Amino acid sequence: MKILIAGGTGFVGRTVMKTLSGQGHRIVVLTRGMGVWTPPVPDVEILSYDNPDRDAWRKQIADHDVVINLAGASIFRLWSYRGKSEIYRSRVLTTRLLVDALTAFPETNTTLFNCSGIGYYGFRGDEPLDEHAPPGVDFLAQVARAWEREALRARPPGRRVVLLRLGHVLGEQGGVLQKLKILSRVRLLAPWGHGRQWFAWIHEQDVASAVSFLLAHPEISGPVNLTAPYPVTLVELTATLNRLSGRRPLVNRIPAWLIRFGMGELATLFLTGQRAVPAKLLEQGFDFQFPELDASLPPLIRKPS
């Protein structure tokens, strides 16, 4: 297949790119400029956002078997008006550009895989959340709903649209794990607040494998939770990371008030969570390489010498 990846320069995009390229797919990366970025695999083609000929650019987008949109600014930033705007615009407006290109050429029937997030569900305590769970009402839920609405505009001509509701992706070169490792290194990795909030995670290799699995199963469409089968609480997560890194934290817990004082509204991301489960992938027979946290972290964690 000829596959276009938007957001291919991010750490999740690089992992997906490597996997799909290794399977013989022709990979094109959509980017705003090459800069110093070097593709992680050979023979990757580059398509720029900045083509002044809009019609030609849209035709180039539509001239792919699959478009995978992983673009979006990090949510780990100050949730000021400017920060929230960047989170929203980087997701919704990028998706709008791609969908406008696809719908301009409905005869191509390009499949769209569009990233979303388990933030769609809001904060629901201990309730297991599969793909049928209703949306939440907080900031990230509103962003995810708008994100998905834009993607679903591509569907009316009969186009297949898959919504990749990503959990916290654990990888060696990016994502939330890098921030947790820094806290562990300075011995401040302890549960935030009560620590019973859920952390729905997935290993980066399982993200890439799941995307490959979905490419091979055209009968699957709509929302798909990309999370491991066994989410953990924050107590379990921090204890496992500290044990594997060989470090004992200086404190048992970090008070919720201190997190709110230092992070403002962003604190809700750390003091709440989603118990999301990958019901659709499991029903379809997807085999997770890293279903449990204990087996997932050792290759990503190096003990201090």
Image: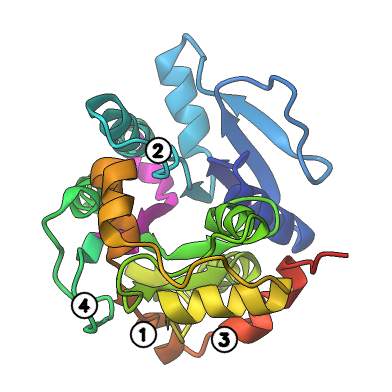
Mark in front: 3 vs 2: 2
Q: Is residue 91 above or below residue 234?
A: above
Residue 151 appearing in the image: no
Q: Using a 10 Å C-alpha cutoff, classify the residue at mark 2 as few (fewer than 14 neighbours), some (14 to 19) or many (20 or more).
A: few
In the rendered image, which residue does mark 2 sit on? 77
Q: In this view, does 90 lie above or below 41?
A: above
Gap between marks 4 and 1, in whole Å?
18 Å
Magenta stretch: give its range: 105-119
In the rendered image, which residue does mark 4 sit on? 125
Percent position (x, y) of residue 41?
Answer: 80, 46
Mark in front: 1 vs 3: 3
Callout 1 secondary element: helix
- Within the image, what quadrant is residue 163 found in? bottom left
Percent position (x, y) of residue 155?
Answer: 26, 53
Q: Using a 10 Å C-alpha cutoff, classify the residue at mark 4 as few (fewer than 14 neighbours), some (14 to 19) or many (20 or more).
A: few
Q: Using a 10 Å C-alpha cutoff, classify the residue at mark 1 as few (fewer than 14 neighbours), some (14 to 19) or many (20 or more).
A: some
